[in-house]
């Protein structure tokens, strides 16, 4: 973490949070005083060196806050008189967003599993088993010949043949495990088992729909979210919606010789898990790419091109800031 503080008519402070940073270089490309330089992004991402993704020249930095406003990862915080500029009306605001509709969510945990930044946590309470599986089962011990066919066939491991004496046995059914599938009843050679599955014929019984529902909470941590869209793409009930920071496309140079598996630099640094190596060639899935440009920065072939057509940052009142930020959407 790097911090710069200057006290005067306005107390200003700039803080770089390396844990949120991915080394995309957006801040460095728009800094009006060229005070920000990228560090060795690839070795840092691979854990080969312990350094900050960016280096800030504390002497040259004019503490304007442009880098903090433009960072799509919120890795730079800028405060004036102890107030974050994100809370001030006169500073730009991102319209990027990620949200999960808890009314629609079925708590399947698909988003939690897919999220590349572990930004989603799902806590769920499953319905009670006795509300889902209903029935009756009984064993006529006098008819039972202790053949153990039911014990061997039971898919729920609910039946046990227990020896109660020197030559006596008892067939015991654990109703907490029984699913009333009737396999034991059909297989019993002496018709010693009587079983009824009530839950197989819902139309004949009255059930409360709430008994069958899974309840829970789904939490999305905005501090970790990178708005990649994995949750939106994978959600089976369309409960997740994502607005990315940029719009545009990623292309590869036609004459580039991608080294694929022997390099995979782009794959190692991508914060969105959007890069795959297919048939020894890098492939970037536009569904998950947020056009941050980190992959282009580390590509040793310089063969990745980021073309941003729109930056979802609003309320840019300063003409000079507009000029600087417009460089991000001209493509490179």
Image (cartoon, helix red, strand yellow):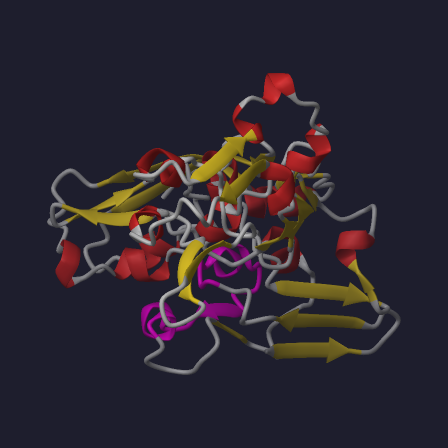
The residue drawn where x is 52% and y is 31% is: 197
- Would you say 11 lies left or right of 110 here? right
The residue drawn where x is 69% and y is 29% is: 209
**Magenta stretch?**
22-46
Residue 266 percent location from the top left of the image: 29, 56
Question: Which quadrant of the structure image shows residue 284?
Answer: top left
Say which of 267 and 180 sits in front. 180
Residue 53 visible to the viewer: yes
The residue drawn where x is 81% and y is 47% is: 90
Say which of 271 and 157 sits in front. 157
Residue 323 within the segment the image draws in magenta? no
Say which of 49 and 224 sits in front. 224
Q: Which residue is at the far bottom?
A: 50
Residue 47 percent location from the top left of the image: 36, 77
Residue 229 percent location from the top left of the image: 49, 40
Residue 101 visible to the viewer: no
């Amino acid at each position: 973490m790097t911090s710069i503080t200057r006290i005067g008519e306005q107390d200003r402070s700039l803080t770089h949070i390396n844990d949120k940073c991915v080394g995309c270089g957006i801040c460095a490309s728009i800094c009006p005083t060229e005070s920000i330089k990228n560090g060795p992004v690839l070795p840092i991402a691979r854990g080969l060196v312990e350094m900050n993704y960016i280096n800030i020249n504390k002497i040259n930095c004019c503490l304007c806050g442009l880098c903090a406003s433009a960072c799509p990862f919120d890795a730079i915080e800028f405060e004036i008189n102890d107030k974050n500029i994100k809370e001030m009306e006169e500073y730009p605001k991102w319209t990027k967003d990620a949200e999960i509709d808890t009314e629609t969510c079925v708590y399947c945990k698909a988003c939690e599993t897919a999220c590349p930044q572990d930004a989603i946590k799902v806590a769920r309470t499953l319905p009670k088993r006795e509300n889902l599986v209903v029935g009756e089962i009984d064993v006529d011990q006098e008819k039972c010949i202790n053949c153990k066919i039911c014990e061997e066939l039971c898919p729920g491991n609910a039946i046990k043949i227990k020896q109660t004496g020197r030559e006596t046995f008892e067939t015991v059914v654990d109703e907490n495990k029984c699913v009333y599938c009737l396999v034991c009843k059909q297989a019993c050679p002496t018709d010693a088992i009587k079983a009824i599955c009530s839950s197989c014929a819902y139309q004949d019984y009255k059930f409360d729909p709430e008994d069958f529902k899974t309840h829970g909470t789904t939490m999305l941590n905005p501090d970790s979210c990178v708005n990649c869209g994995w949750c939106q793409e994978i959600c089976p009930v369309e409960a997740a919606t994502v607005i990315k920071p940029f719009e545009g496309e990623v292309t590869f140079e036609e004459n580039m010789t991608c080294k694929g598996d022997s390099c995979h630099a782009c794959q190692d640094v991508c914060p969105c898990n959007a890069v795959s190596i297919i048939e020894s060639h890098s492939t970037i899935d536009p569904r998950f790419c947020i056009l941050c440009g980190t992959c282009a920065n580390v590509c040793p072939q310089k063969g990745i091109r980021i073309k941003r057509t729109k930056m979802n940052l609003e309320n840019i009142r300063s003409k000079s800031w507009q000029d600087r930020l417009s460089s991000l959407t001209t493509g490179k």
